Amino acid sequence: MGSAENVRNNEQPPFGPGSDLGSGSGIASDAGQARARLDRAASVANFRAAREVLWQHATDYDTAYRTFEWPELGEFNWALDHFDPMARGNDRPALWVVEADGSERVHTFDRLARRSDQVANHLRALGLGRGDRVLVMLGNVGELWEVMLGAIKLGVVLIPATLLLSTEDLADRLDRGEVRAVIAAAEVADRFADLPGAPLRIAVRAADDSNTVPGDSNTAPDDSTAVPAGWHDYAQVDAAAEEFTPDGPTLADDPLLLYFTSGTTSKPKLVEHTHASYPVGHLSTMYWIGLRPGDVHLNISSPGWAKHAWSNLFAPWNAEATVLVFNYGRFDAQQLLEVIARCKVTTMCAPPTVWRMLIQADLGAHRTDLRELVGAGEPLNPEVIEQVRTAWGLTIRDGFGQTETTCQIGNSPGQPVKLGSMGRPLPGYHVALLDPDGKPADEGELSLDLARRPLGLMRGYRGDAERTADAMRDGHYHTGDVAARDADGWITYVGRADDVFKASDYRISPFELESVLIEHPAVAEAAVVPSPDPLRLAVPKAYVVLVEGRTPGPELARDILAFTREKLSAYKRIRRLEFADLPKTISGKIRRVELRNHEADRTENRNPNEYWDSDFPDLRQG
């Protein structure tokens, strides 16, 4: 595809977690023996050499794509072999947490190296060891990063969890995740009260901010927060030794992370990543963002989700940059802009929702040190990109990836950006668009070539060989997303394969229609699904959530329909519109399957607050 097809067909290096996943087994074969021949020093040297290629060609996409190869790894533990050598004696800020009340804590690289050694020693003293499953349910607090690093050093398998999980969600995770230990904020401990499993439980109490001074990272826990009965106090980490000795080598393809993906049509899947696939695989994410040593990187993301690990852990620390966290409760655009300016943020990643809220503030009133801006989750509409470019002289660059992968496709630094496009395959990713027959096409399911398997691809779906085999069938990893490629090789997102539908025999991308809908000033969110129609079989129907202060009614419905007609071809026109709340997963993904089923089961009666274009004869004549 475009420049990707011109790349020489590099031989797959010995390391590729689960390199036989194309057959659906999800288990590495004899590749492990080849990997074990590489000791830690050789693995680290290969990692650094691969990183250097990306830095050397940071703004030269063609050369970076042509020359980059994933590093061959054998024994490798990212926290011990990359982070610690970079962090020891390094007093630069590694983690900078700014609270909404203005208080802040700065954790240096050296402190995090020593503190994570204490965490690893303490967890080992409590009986945890290599391969044990640990569910981590913490907010944006320093202890989260200490635990992540300490757990990686020890070799346990981490299961990140959002604070939004209910008791029912947690019961599923403890059961299917075979969780041995939980490390959670004390204030959510009650959700585990009646749940079996996870015999070891550790509570992290909120910090006592009464004597906090800017830059102080050594605040004690708030004694007014009690440690729940039967739980260990995380503060006991303070007494552990500051030097950790591993019990043996970590292999790069040892399991490291289990992510419960938020399923929109079924129970969450367990995505398994290794000590290579996420830590080292995020070299592609580092390249996409444009991270350099000394950067101050701000990522707007919540703990528990893969994107938090992407941009708040692995990508910035691969680049030896500072992770800046703005730990707010309620989003305030003005306050965020003040943090960006005061903390001299150089690189920033935020979802489209945040960018849309930011442009409501006066961007030009803030003098910033920003150099790179990226967005992920969905393409940004041109209006947002233009307003940011006018105010800051910078272009927000899109990217695409999944929980199952690192960043696969992106607009990389220094390259032309085509509005609406996700960009081109990133170094190390060989992308194919496959039609329903599995043949290459200019529009089709976005898939990854397993003959040149990217290091950043998951090992598989843990405990689900059938799903793994289906995702890895016919020599490709199938993302389930549909995309289109233009003549220059730029790729544009179309939608989830399950969401694309036909109306009057035309293929409709809900994503494209939704992107137009949210450009209307009254629309906060939208979801488009097929609605049965006796003439066309199906027509596009939009479910719309309004911004605060707007009231649903026929006048507004007509205005929104008229607005979209000006921007969409006739065959793509939205024929029906309903003002309603959108069903969502716990991670905020819209459950379109519920909306589709609702439409499929509909009677002849209209739903409340539902309007059709036939209600407005003047509109249909226009």
Image: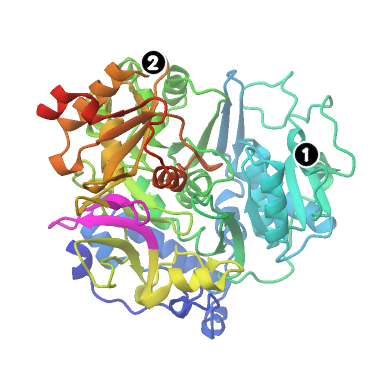
Is residue 145 at least partly visible in the picture?
Answer: yes
Q: Secondary structure at mark 1?
A: helix
Q: Quadrant of residue 12?
A: bottom left
Label located before the other in sequence (2 or 1): 1
Query: Residue 158 versus residue 82: which sits nearer the camera?
Result: 158
Q: Residue furthest front?
A: 604
Q: Magenta residues?
A: 479-501
Q: Residue furthest left?
A: 622
Q: Name the disc covering residue 189, or none.
A: 1
x and y percent of residue 216 in the render?
A: 66, 28
x and y percent of residue 276 in the render?
A: 52, 65
Q: Is residue 419 left or right of residue 253?
A: left
**Residue for point 53% across, 42% down:** 587
How many numbered discs, if any? 2
Q: Amino acid at mark 2?
A: Thr
Q: Name the disc covering residue 551, or none.
A: 2
